[in-house]
Image (cartoon, rainbow, N blue to C red):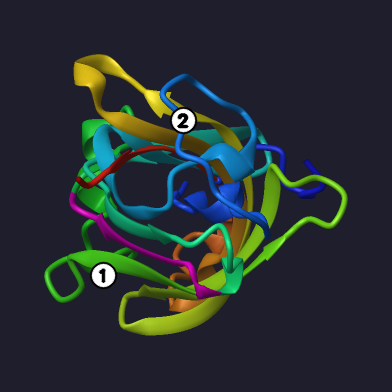
Amino acid sequence: MRSPFRYIASSVAAVALLTAGGVVAQSALTRVPAEVSAGAYKLDSDHGKITWSVSHLGFSTYTGQFVNVQAELKLDPANPSASTLTATIPLTDVASGNAGLNGHLQTADFFDTANHPTATFVSRSVTVDADDANEATVVGDLTLRGVTRPVTMEVEFNQAGPSMGNAYRAGFDGEATIKRSEFGITYGTQMGLGDEVKLHIEGEFTLQR
């Protein structure tokens, strides 16, 4: 992947499977984007998480996750620019591995979930890599704490096909980096808490019949 960020959740940004050309629905697993079924997909929240990482005062890289993410994906492989991805991230469902930090993240120092319980992402464009049809750049608007900023995600298609229960799935990984200060979150920066937050997004999307 050509993304400069090797380890961000789309994602949900799952639209990387799009390529120009015809679409052939497959009954077996495929890693060829043109063979993936077009249509409306929903994220399987049990297999869709956003892992975040940030410098902890320069001593280490601290990681955590957002879980119970909700996302909808509309795929149009014949016309990638017409595809859309929307996601809702419940900020109260953060798993940092530390109960005290989980609670602190809910306060006005960070997410202010009393006033802004969720973050949202809405895609605006999808551009498939000219050299690798399994990779795409997804640009969209992230709204966090009532502030909306553009975010660019680099997304990679993993595979698609029937899964458990014969549900048709498509799987992806994505990466992005944001600056928390751009969303009004500046707590700890004077002490050396990192401003840049790297996001790794993983997602399995289920085709809606």
On screen, residue 87 versus residue 117, left or right, reads: right
Residue at 87%, 49% in the rendered image: 131
Q: Secondary structure at mark 1?
A: loop
Taking the magenta stretch, the answer to whether it contains residue 59 is: no
Residue 202, relative to residue 186: is it above or below?
above
How many residues crowd around disc 1 within 10 Å: few (fewer than 14), some, or many (20 or more)? Answer: some
Residue nearest the observer in this picture, 17 or 47 = 17
Magenta stretch: dominant secondary structure: strand
Question: Which residue sits at x=47%, y=34%?
Answer: 171
- From the viewer's perspective, is 39 left or right of 154? left
Q: Earlier in the sequence, mark 2 or mark 1?
A: 2
Q: Which residues are magenta?
A: 82-92
Q: Is residue 206 left or right of residue 141?
A: left
Does the magenta-highlighted stretch encompass residue 84? yes
Where does the N terminus fall, quadrant-wise? top right
Residue linked to disc 2? 26
Which residue is at 26% across, 70% downward? 108
Residue 26 at least partly seen? yes
Give the number of the disc on residue 6: none
Whether 138 is drawn above or below 44: the answer is below
Give residue 108's mark.
Answer: 1
Residue 49 location, x and y as percent?
A: 37, 38
Q: Amino acid at mark 2?
A: Gln
**Which callout, 2 or 1, points to the residue nearer the camera?**
2
Looking at this view, is 173 or 21 the one in front?
21
Q: Amino acid at mark 1?
A: Ala
